[in-house]
Amino acid sequence: PEQCLPDGGPLLQRELGLGGSGIRAFSVHATCLSFLVGLETACMLLARADTPDDALILVCSSEISSRHVDPTDEHVAPLFGDGAAACVVRKASWREGSALHRAHMETYADGASLTEVRGGGTNFPFHRVDDRAAPNPAATREVNHFQMDGPATMRMVLQHGPGFMERLRPGLSSGLGDIAWVVPHQASGLALDAITDALGWPAERMLRTLDRLGNVVAASIPLTLHAGVTSGRIQRGDKLLLMGTGAGLSFGGMILTF
């Protein structure tokens, strides 16, 4: 976030010139899966009986990963990128055919320590608890930088990933069926190859932006979706699978008709 309080929702509203509008603005934080959770939240709000048919919801994901990556770490620093993406969501008419068919998320907190930035919270406050005028020696450079145990994370992904996909929709653990395109979180090239091989998915139906944008965390999935649309590969009426993993360790997936 830009700052601890208020969260990013009101700050974005103000930047859009809507600071006096009263429009609700709030943040959804689920690390790399934030866009999926935000999109699902928007769909649930649109489905409410008291939501006007012409209501519009802005879902925005942005990351400045470079602020929390150790630039001297040759394994991590080159992988991440900074970026932002946004979409406007509204109710689709029956003629348009666009729909959210299924959304599912699972969390395995046994992997919570595998991917983390430990600083910035109550565990490592910037000041000492017994002397708030003094800096906290525990709030070191290391705890405020991104840290990841890549091999252990990959083992958990391969352990739980196929079962998660099967629970998202039967058959996904062994093929894509009528899914036209997979829009994945761009965790790493190794992760994308491993999950594609493990699930038997055709590599040509997996959209990739990692080579150009890097891992842009919460903005990764919407930026890849945008690349698929603007390149002409994703067409109206295509059935898409948006999916990925996030720190926690969490798995998220969404099937929709574009």
Image (tube, helix red, strand yellow):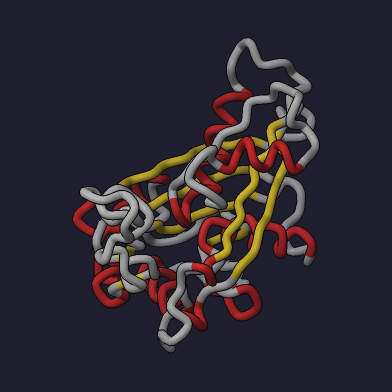
The correct choice, above or below, for 29 with respect to 83 in the image is: above
The correct choice, above or below, for 193 with respect to 54 in the image is: below
Residue at (44, 71) in percent of width and height: 196
Q: Quadrant of the C terminus?
A: top right
Q: Is residue 94 visible?
A: no
Percent coordinates x, y for residue 126 in the rendering: 35, 56
Please indicate whether residue 4 sits to the left or right of residue 56 in the image: left
Please indicate whether residue 171 sits to the left or right of residue 242 in the image: left
The correct choice, above or below, for 13 with respect to 230 in the image is: above
Please indicate whether residue 189 sits to the left or right of residue 224 in the image: left
Q: Which residue is nearer to you in this view: 141 or 173?
A: 141
Percent coordinates x, y for residue 77 in the rendering: 48, 80
Q: Which residue is nearer to you in this view: 220 or 1?
A: 1
Residue at (79, 62) in percent of width and height: 230
Percent coordinates x, y for residue 210 in the rendering: 58, 75
Residue at (70, 37) in percent of width and height: 13
Q: Is residue 158 visible?
A: yes
Percent coordinates x, y for residue 116 in the rendering: 33, 62
The correct choice, above or below, for 47 with respect to 213 in the image is: above
Please indicate whether residue 102 sits to the left or right of residue 9 in the image: left
Q: Which residue is nearer to you in this view: 129 or 96?
A: 129
